[in-house]
Amino acid sequence: MAEIRSVGIPSPRVEGEQKVAGAAVYAVDVKLADMLWAKVLRSPIAHARIKSIDVSKAAALAGVKAILTGKDLAGAKIGKKIIDMPLLAEDVVRFAGEKVVGVAAESEAIAEAALDLIDVEYDPLPVLTDAIEAMQPNAPLIHPNVAAYKGLLHKIDTPSNVFVHLTWKKGVVEEGFRQSDVVVENTFSVPAVHQAYIEPHSSLVRVNADGTADVWSSNKSPFGMRDAVANALQIVPASLIIHPCYVGGDFGGKGDGNDVALCYALARQAGRPVKLTIDYTEELMAGNPRHGAVIKIKTGVMKNGLMIAEHIEFVFDSGAYGSYRPQGYLVGAHDAPGPYRVPNCLVEEKYVYTHKMPAGYMRAPGHLQAFFASESQADLVAKRLGMEPTEFRRINFMHDGDASPLGHVIPHVKATETLARAIDASGFKQAKGKNVGRGCAIGDWVSKGGESYAIVTIDERGNVTLSSAVTDTGPGVFTMMRQIVSEEIKVPIDAITVEMLDSNKVVKDTGVRGSSSTRVHGGSALDAAGKMRDEILKLAAQAMDARPDELMLFDGGVTHGRAERRMTYGEIARAHGGPIIVEGHYLNMTDGPEASLVAQVAEVEVDRETGAVRVTKLTTAHNTGTILNPLTHQGQIDGAVMMGFGYGLIENLAYDESGKVLAANLGEYKIPNIKDIPDLKTTILQSDFGSGPYNSMSIGETALIPTAAAIANAVEDAVGVRIRSLPITAEKVLNALKAR
């Protein structure tokens, strides 16, 4: 009989049957017998002083059980790192869509009707929607008391709308520019875009008589949410019991606890559970989208193409608050210089308050803004030098053990090899037709760390259960964890049952984030499975009167080869006197050490008469580690490529002059659909250096990082015009062609 193998096999998703059958529980599915429904009155204008709020008519409406305003929750602010967002606007509203009044009623219809009965009088104030204008010394202060906020990344001596200013550097950049033969400067801009997950936010809170509260929420970071909510409400974090739910898409947008905190406050006032499910119009006007940004790049090179210096300055539009960023800044922006050898480098990040909806995290946060600019710049520098773009990149690439542009030594960085794969697989240098262009771009990703626990149990019947508090947002984290346990204790994947744990069952879980699930949650599963393997061998050795090294695990049992004896796992558990339970733990908060590399080639056709750009082929090459599940691995790549495609060509969370979002639904906010998908080609260069189980590497975010730049570079190759702002629309291309 063949040995059971699970790692490297295209395993179906463990939750697939549940989801197809409609049995998977999402937060919107959870209902309690005496539950109230919440609705939120939102500000219709972007900036105003609240003169008065009259809720008397709404309070008198039959079925209304609780109403809260900012005065009722005065001083209660929430944030993941920077705590600057009130649960309900108090004296001032700072964006169109901000919560002003919360209502809980017997039904959604009654709560909705109550909102229509609330009278709010506003005194309009000047609106700042441009981050560059908001930076100016004479700009009105959006947060006059910013210096007093908790969680700031640095001291603020003089309040301004620039409330985060970070610098990352190596060498002396000005000296590098003086040494350079050629200096190239460009400015790029990108808009805010929405994560466009299918499931909108939904939260349900029940406050219990003993002071605890039960929480169900479409949230990927239960422990982070618990801490943020507890801090805002001044309650003990452990008193919040977060019950696991599947999350119907996240892409970085479901890590906050703002709605949960409001539901808690309403439930506490009403004495009954409260549920809030927002609609998609609310998602688009008050979500936490990817940051819009203006990026200035100045690059100094020698005539032979060697990079000497680079200065990259980001101005990120934070929107009205900074509360949605877990670290207070975007973790990918300072990676903007890419996998190149740059002896003198300076990266500046400025986060600016404006009167737009607060921006947050979205898949590869900071990387997409950064690499659209830096990889577009790479082509422009090469063009200035008269060099072929791939050759310019090749001579400047880092190699194993080189220091990054910011001084971090990267022991594994296969940039040269990855780009060569992409060039070869795409036919980059082959002849092409009229108005057809090809563009390349590269991106790198240093793996992220985290903490998680996994519990493996074998009962007296031999049943294996894998338990974890991680939330599955769609990529299939439990499938991956189950594969690892199967591989280590030699049982079929289908024999392992998965259990999602409440937050009070484990100490900590950093949640699904930053392409870390395989490393972090796979790490805890591997630790638990290894401990279970050792425990099984120890107990079997005792029962068989043998040494553990005489035994082997095989097909759900232990075999003593010499004595030809065998015990099943159920028999071992019964001999033990009860279930065998082990706990695995993974804790490594540091990034790296390896870099996951991606190189892409976009092929486009441009219609000179209309400016329309059609992407005909996208080739993606990855340097990655051991592939645990080829099916889900490829799914991550294809999904990411199309998200990068949307960022490059279609998506734009646009505002009018008054600060209101123009799109009210997903029909108006355009994202790629099945007809947009070009020919997708993937080529993989595998290494054995990954920091995840079995030397696996991150894959979830890398494939969308360079796509927009590859398309922009291909457009210029096709028709000779450079588009420096996203999305790359037909109008922009046509105007550029006319201007030329």
Image: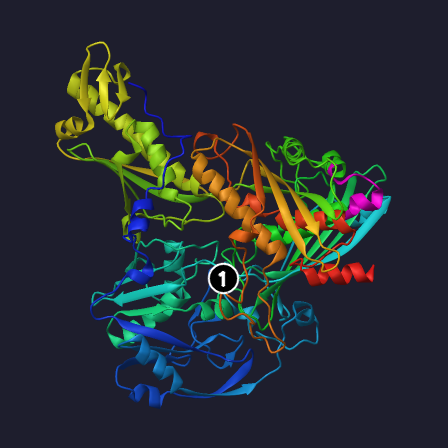
Extent of the magenta region:
380-390
**Image-based side of 249 in relation to 431, left or right:** left
Which image quarter is the C terminus in? Answer: bottom right
Task: Using the image, determine if residue 54 lies above or below residue 538.
Answer: below
Percent across and percent down for residue 425 are 63, 33
SS label for mark 1: loop
Task: Using the image, determine if residue 75 lies above or below residue 381.
Answer: below
The outermost residue toward the top is: 562
Residue toward you, 453 or 407: 453
Percent across and percent down for residue 246 are 34, 53
Residue 240 belongs to the span the image colors magenta: no
- Overall secondary structure of the magenta section: helix
**Image-based side of 631 in relation to 327, left or right:** left
Q: What's the residue at 55%, 77% (across, down)?
A: 46
Percent across and percent down for residue 81 are 49, 59
Residue toward you, 612 or 226: 612
**Image-based side of 232 in relation to 423, left or right:** left
Task: Using the image, determine if residue 348 lies above or below residue 533.
Answer: below
Task: Using the image, determine if residue 521 lies above or below residue 610.
Answer: above
Residue type, mark 1 in image: Tyr
Which image quarter is the N terminus in? Answer: top left
Percent across and percent down for residue 225 are 39, 59
How crowded pointer 1 is (Cα within 10 Å; few <14, some 14-19, many 20+) is rated as: many
Q: Quadrant of residue 586?
A: top left
> Which residue does the numbered mark 1 point to in the structure image?
324
- For the question of whether residue 129 can be seen, the reply is yes
- For the question of whether residue 346 can be seen, the reply is no
Q: Quadrant of residue 16?
A: top left
